[in-house]
Amino acid sequence: MGGPDLKKRRDILFSKFPPGQVPEAADHLQRLDEVDVQPKHEKRTVGVGYELTQHTLQELEEHLLDRGYHLDNTLMSKLTRALVYYVENTQLHNLDAPERRIKRSSQEAYVKAWESHLHGDHDDTPPEWREYK
C-alpha cells in the first residue's frame, strides 16, 4: 500500500464581479514558489497544482483574499471549500502523527482501561465503619 497522495490539483472559483480577476490572480499565484497555475478564463477559475507539504488551498485562497480578490461565495462553493480545507488539514495532521501501536493482545487493552477506570466496586465507607459491630 502506497503513502498518501500529497500532490493536489484544485480550482479556485472567482465571483462574477468584479470581472477580469482570473488573469491578475493567476499572475499573483505564479509568483509563489512550487505552485503550478492554469488560468481558465471561460470558467472564472484558476487551476492550481501544489504539494500539500508546501501549500494548502486555504493558504492560497487567503493569499488572494488579502490582495482584494473576490472568490465565489455561493453555498456550494463554501461547502466545497470547507471540505477541502478540512481534508487537507487532517492529512497534514496525520503526516505528523506517530504510528499507532497495536497491542499484543486485545485483553491487554481492556485490562489497562479497567485499571484506570473508576468502577462500581469501590466502597467509600471508612474502614472503621465497615468493621463496626
Image (cartoon, rainbow, N blue to C red):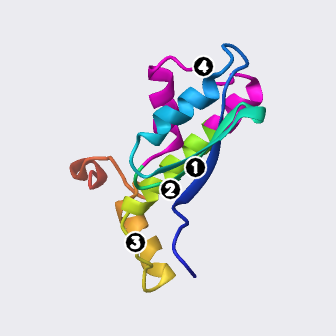
CA separation in Å, label 2 and label 3: 14 Å
Look at discs 3 and 4 and give the one toward the viewer.
4
Say what amino acid the circle numbered 3 marks: Glu
In the rendered view, does 86 fall on the left or right side of 78? left
Which residue is denoted by mark 2 in the rendering?
91
- Determine which of the numbered discs, if any, sits on residue 70 in the image: 4
Upstream in the sequence, badge 1 or badge 3? 1
- The residue drawn where x is 53% and y is 41% is 57
In the rendered view, does 95 fall on the left or right side of 7? left
Which residue is denoted by mark 3 in the rendering?
99
Look at discs 4 and 2 and give the one toward the viewer.
4
Upstream in the sequence, badge 2 or badge 3? 2
Say what amino acid the circle numbered 2 marks: Gln
CA separation in Å, label 1 and label 3: 19 Å
> For the residue labelled by badge 3, is the local secondary structure a helix, a strand or a loop?
loop
Q: Nearer the viewer, residue 60 or 96?
A: 60
Give, as a single range, the part of the protein colored magenta. 55-81
**Contact flag, marks 2 and 3 (Cβ < 8 Å):** no
- The spot of residue 32 in percent (x, y) is 41, 42
